[in-house]
Amino acid sequence: MKKSFYLFPLLVLLFFTHCAENHPELLVETLTISADKEHIIADDEELISFSIQSQNGRNWTNEAKIFVNGVLLDGNKFKTSEVGAFRCHAVLNEVTSNEIVFTSKIKPATLTLSADRKSILADGQDHLTFVVTDAQGKDVSALAKIKVNDVPVQGLNYKATDVGIQNAVAFVGKEYSLPLSFVTNKVEEITLTADKPLVFVDGEDKLILTVKNAEGQDLTGESRFFVGETPMASNVYRPESVGQLSFTAIYNDNKSTSVMVTARKPIEYKLVIKPSKEILIGDNVDEVSFSCINTAENDEDLTSETTFFIDGQPLGGRVFKTDKVGTYRITARYKDHDAEPLLLVVDPHPDTIAKSLTLSADKDEIFADGEAMVTFTVKNQADRDFTSQATIQINNKPISGNTLKTTTPDIYKIVAIVGSVKSNIVTINAIKRPALLKIEANKNKIIADNKDEVILTCINTADKDKDVTGEATFFVDGKAISGNKFKTNKVGDYRITARFDGSESSPVLIVAEPHPDTIVKELTITANKRSFVANNKEVVTFRAKNQANKDFTSEATFYVNDKPISGNTFKTSVADAYKVYAKVGDKQSNVLTLQATPRPASLRLQLDKRSILADGAQKVRFTVQDANDRDISSKATFMVNGQRINAREYSTDVPGTYKVVAMYEEEHSEEETFTAHRPERITIEIDKQELTLGTDRALFTVRNSAQSDITDASQIFINGQAIPSRYHTPDRVGTFRAYAIYNGNKSAEISFHVKEAVIQNLLVKADKSVIVSDGADFAILRCTDSSRGGRDVTEEAEFFADGQRLQSNMLKTQKVGNISITAKLKNQTSAPLQLRGQTALSAVPKLYVEEFTGTWCPYCPRAIHMVDEASKNPQVIAVAFHTGANSKGHPRYDPFSSSATLIVGNVLGVGSYPSLVANRDRNQHIPAYGNPVGITSRIPSDTSVGIAIQTTLSRHHLSATVNVRSSETREAAHWVAIITEDKLIADQRNGTGRYPHIGKNFSHDHVYRKSYGDVRDGTEFSLPKDQTQHLTFSLNLDNKLVPSNCKLVILVMDKDRKVLNAQVVKLGDSISY
């Protein structure tokens, strides 16, 4: 049976060979594919038909396999609903035809869609009405179906609840319109205000209107204004007629409430001042108030806005009072208008006349010391103060002012005179001041050593602090002393006074203290060491000193851990921390901490195992060596958990952890531990007994006697070698034995077998079917093994092109025509894959978009969302240029701000943020309203420029080779390289009310970081037709960049710096045309 199976294909091959030899028309050397048209409409209805002929003109359409964009057709006809370019070729008996290209285009729109409004409120109530006309202008609205954002609309009226730019399309049968864009605006409260309630009809006065939203944002420049129903040209209005005016404003279809303003003719002025009284009493109490009336305007009261003047000086209000008699000229000014002046008479108060006078003094006796003073007051019969107007005489002599002080003891007579009126007489007795003594000492404490002394001074404060020390007598505790110095050898307090001129001073206190060296105010202890060995031999010695560094050791009592010790030394056999202090009387010293360390272990204890079974039989054996490496195990004593044992082996039937110490004479070892585990039966299982190398992995499970899974707590061994987990992927063939150990319990062994994998079917693939034969374009090859579930074996396989071994899985060629690609792995060879090399450029067109943005910008999330979504299309390449301040405290701080943003933005006419510009063309600004279709709809269908990139990355050093090929000659082309970075974390302001993922700790992508060459103009180079230009460069990346998050963008531009095509690749990767 097997023999006949292998003979069948051979017989078929011999049959066709025989037929071809006898019938040459059956021999296929080359194939040519053609189509009945170059373009179809992308309506999923119009068909394109293909036919295939061989070199001899024979038609093979029914026998050949036809591929469109690499997908096999069922038959020879094709239709589509997708717009774009399609590549088609045929294959018959391993012969590949030429490749043809056809395009599908959007069906032209024949309907016209319009609406009665360009915007509405997104409140679910406001609406617009659609109108649809056909190519002849006939209204077909009743037959039309409307879709807004691909959602059908009931009828012709549309209401919205979503804010943004909406796109509507009309359909009548298979006819449709171009999209109609309109805006649905957010519902928000707006407030209209006028800068004044009254405006004059004089051709000059104007009214200024302002619009703000609920957040206080000024919307004036974006609003429309109406007076009544009439639109205004701006927010400034000059009335032409008098009357009540009603103003409203509209912002994004939100209408404000009305504001009423009065328009009237200019005011005429005839100002009159009206006083509240005709005569004012000049007593600084009586007051008059003024009003200003415009008699030309029905006596309109202008007082609140009028400035009043008294004799040309501003009054500072409307009320006036004074204590000066006379006539005052009152004037007033309202804005630029002056009132008629008014004369105001101020009369004296009756009580301001002196008919009789009364003189009084604040005291009738003073000291004649030149400092004590008496003050006089003069009043008239109405008790009004006339002191300032009166002349005061003392002993018939006038004085200046109203006070008296003297150094001459005497009796003084005083009288006051105002004009011809005299007061009563007041008598003042000036007497001599008695002495007032004060003692001053140069110190208030002395040492009671009969040497230290205090010097005393006696001051008479009643006589200008006169020093009377030489005339005074000093007393110590009531006993007179000679002179003004005092010393003693007795500790205590001393009361000192002084006497002079019959007066005695207040006492001062002098303290005689003992010498500081003889007392303990502060006590400090020290130790000759802070750390010692707890061997009951090594001694610590303490000393105690007072604040004068005098030794008080013998007088001190020392405490260790709050217990007094005898003497000033300490030793112990217990390793621990000890706190030490001393006391002398009630004075306690500082506290020292001593560390008694264990005796160093001089013996070395070893255990033959760290765990045993607690079965009373399995033992752990101890070995001890001394410092000279001599085995003293038979002489040593062992302590297990504090219990002495008489042997060097130990077993137990009690599970637990055990601590062992070895001792010999006065030496000991460090503590060692072992664990005794409860005996139990464990088993090990494997999920398969036979595994295939390179495909399978084993899963082990360990269970205890209760069948609980204890794998994670167990150690698994394969051929005696431990493995790190329960999973094992074999790396060689053979038979293997496995067992497990859990808490000292070992399982029985199990065996399993690993066999060699059988490769049955290798399949080679390429990322493109046609490459440019310029040695620069390339195709990436992959190899899979379908017998192992399509496993990728590219790294293991070798690749061949027309039988020649390739160095890697990248194919470059200069051959024109078919190229046969095969892959080999372990003596297995794949079926050939046919690629085609051609001189004509075949490149993928890319759309290049520059996003101008800032983390501070509240509306930039619209553009961010658009670009992020559009960039998921591999034909869209984006670079985000950030702008903002570099200071963190600045309201426009942007951590990714670059000077390149303004350099590029100024050339492209970027005046606001966000902004989107396609292909460096200032005429291709993209509305940033959040819909990614606004970007992807601009992807070109073809390109005349191809860009291939190969990069190598070594840490932060990038090297790149860029190959550029053009199907047209371009003498003044330019190129530039840009580095972008993804996953940059920063807060992004979001005031759109949408895109909740864009905000705190947002991950920013495709952020501009660096360029090679001028970021705006690039580097000039020539592009001859159908010749590949090779560009190489290298650059160092900033250390703050993460290379794995970075990409390289290459732009090729025309002489006007507009982008012809772009390419992007991750650093370290490569990409073809």
Image (cartoon, rainbow, N blue to C red):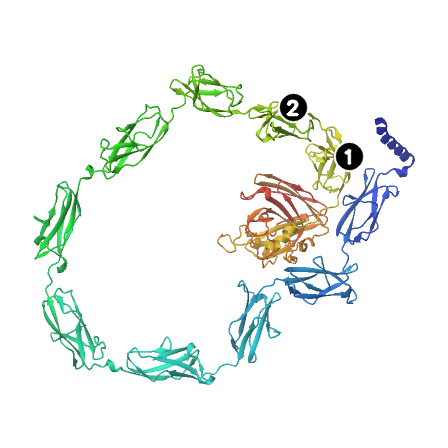
Q: Is residue 597 above or below residue 1067?
A: above
Is residue 94 visible in the rendered image? The answer is yes
Give percent across and percent down for residue 882. 57, 52
Residue indicated by mark 1: 831
186, above or below 571, in the image:
below
Report x, y in % for residue 1038. Answer: 54, 44
Q: Is residue 393 left or right of residue 544?
A: left
Residue under the point 73% across and 51% down:
941
Is residue 336 toward the left or the right of residue 323 in the image?
A: right
Where in the figure is residue 423, as x and y percent of width and height? 16, 78
Q: Which mark is residue 750?
A: 2
The C terminus, quarter of image: top right
Give the amino acid type for the residue marked by disc 2 in the picture: Ile
Could you tell me the amino acid type at mark 1?
Ala
Mark 2 Cα shell of 10 Å, populated few (<14), some (14-19), many (≥20)? some
**Is residue 1035 visible in this depiction of the protein?**
no
